[in-house]
Each structure stands twice: as structure tokens, then as C-alpha cells.
Image: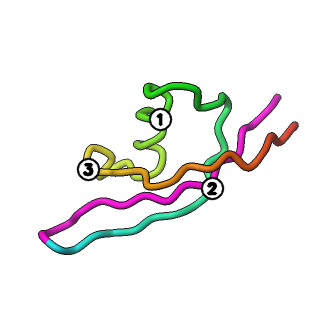
């Protein structure tokens, strides 16, 4: 099995002028190849606020073979 490793930076607005910044590592079972894949990872990053989440950067780091 392969897992694709991505680093992400994202943010969402809580109140006018206040933002929450999030960054981390995402281990996914498939590559991100289109906009739908991009939209599908938002709930994985921030389940409660995924509808307000903007991914600022998304970098592919490599493949982990298990």
C-alpha cells in the first residue's frame, strides 16, 4: 500500500479580522490530481470549519510504502 504525503498550510476566519492558521502533514491513500480531490481534503484538515477553510499552500513531499 502507498500513502502520499503532503504538507499543507490553511486558514479560516472566526470573526471579522481574526483568523486561525493551520499547518500539518496529510497522509492520503490517493494523489491529489484535481479540484475535487482538493475539496475532499478540507474536512480532513478541519472537520468543523471545512466550509470556511482556504488552503494557502499544498506541497507534495513523497510516497510512503507500507
User: Which residue is pictured at 59% across the width and 31% down the height?
Assistant: 32
Q: Percent from the top left, x then y, of residue 44?
A: 48, 44
Q: Residue furthest right?
A: 66
Category of crowding for the residue at label 1, using alpha-carbon neighbours closer than 10 angstroms: few (below 14), some (14–19), many (at least 20):
few
The residue that label 1 is drawn on is 38
Q: Is residue 21 left or right of residue 41?
A: left
Magenta region: 1-16
Q: Position of residue 46 (x, y in %)?
A: 40, 52
Secondary structure beneath label 2:
strand
**Quadrant (top left, top right, bottom left, bottom right) of the C terminus:** top right
Picture coordinates of residue 19, whole percent (x, y)? 28, 70
Instruction: Mark 3 or mark 2: name the one nearer the start of the chain.
Output: 2
Q: Residue at 41% x, 42% y: name it.
A: 43
Question: In the rendered structure, which disc, 2 or 1, sits on the residue that comes first in sequence?
Answer: 2
| Separation (CA) of disc 3 from disc 1 | 14 Å
Q: Which residue is mark 2?
A: 25
Mark nearest the camera among 2 and 1 is 1
- At numbered mark 1, what does the secondary structure look like: helix, strand or loop? helix
Which element carries disc 3, helix, strand or loop?
loop
Amino acid at each position: 500500500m502507498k500513502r502520499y504525503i503532503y504538507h499543507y498550510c490553511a486558514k479560516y476566519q472566526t470573526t471579522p479580522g481574526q483568523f486561525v492558521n493551520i499547518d500539518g502533514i496529510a497522509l492520503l491513500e490517493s494523489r491529489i490530481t484535481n479540484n475535487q480531490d482538493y475539496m475532499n481534503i478540507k474536512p480532513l484538515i478541519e472537520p468543523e470549519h471545512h466550509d470556511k477553510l482556504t488552503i494557502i499552500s499544498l506541497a507534495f513531499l513523497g510516497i510512503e510504502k507500507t
